[in-house]
Amino acid sequence: MTNVLLDAKALSSIAVEALQEKKGREILRMDLRDADGSVTDFFVLCTGTSDRHVQALADSVMEIMSKNGEKPHNKEGIDKAEWILLDYVNIVVHIFQGDTRAFFRLEDLWGDAKIERIE
């Protein structure tokens, strides 16, 4: 159930902060609200340096989102930690190892999305 006090952009900002706290790399937020064929409002993408780092990034997101009343509707890839997907319905967080992110190139699939690169 989505917290009605926080909109999708605010939730994506919370996820970004959690990734930054654990030193996630190449963080970006994709605004998909006006993109063709999108089933969510925002993607947040991040790269980790190892399976442990990817797992720590996912744990950080789940912890901070939980503190804000949000639980993932679905989560995938937790066991392998090559690509972890955390689906919060209005936002989806993708945490990759570098090679996996380079192979799938999600940021290239939605050419009409607004992309914000996070420093």
Image (cartoon, rainbow, N blue to C red):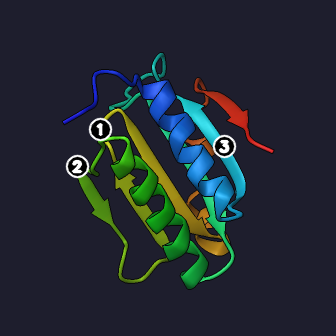
Q: Earlier in the sequence, mark 3 or mark 1?
A: 3
Point 46% across, 50% down: residue: 93
Q: Give the residue number, with chain letter if any, for mark 3.
A: 28
Q: Is residue 102 left or right of residue 69?
A: right
Q: Residues within 10 Å of mark 3 (few under 14, many from 20)?
A: some
Q: Residue at x 41, y 45 (%)?
A: 92
Which residue corresponds to mark 1? 89
Q: From the viewer's perspective, is residue 54 above or below residue 36?
A: below
Query: Crowdedness of circle 1 by 10 Å Cα count: few (<14), some, many (20+)?
Result: some
In the picture, measured across the screen, residue 75 lies left or right of residue 49, that is left
Q: Could you tell me if the residues under marks 1 and 2 are in contact, i.e. CB atoms within 8 Å?
A: yes
User: Looking at the image, which residue is at 29% across and 38% down?
Assistant: 89
Could you tell me how far apart the alpha carbons at marks 3 and 2 are, in whole angstroms?
A: 21 Å
At label 2, counting other C-alpha atoms closer than 10 Å, the crowd grade (few under 14, some 14-19, many 20 or more) is: few
Depth check: 91 or 65 in front? 65
Q: Earlier in the sequence, mark 3 or mark 2?
A: 3
User: x%, y% of residue 75?
Assistant: 30, 61
Vertical comparison of 110 with 76: above or below: above
Cα distance in 3D space between marks 1 and 2: 7 Å
Q: Which residue is mark 2?
A: 73
The reply to whether residue 110 is in sight is no
**SS at mark 3 in the image:** strand
Q: Of residues 117 and 70, which is closer to you in this image?
A: 70
**CA gap, disc 3 and disc 1:** 18 Å
Residue furthest out toward the left: 1
Rendered location of residue 11, percent (x, y): 45, 34
Residue toward you, 31 or 53: 53
Q: Position of residue 109 (x, y in %)?
A: 55, 41
Indicate the amino acid at tag 3. Answer: Leu
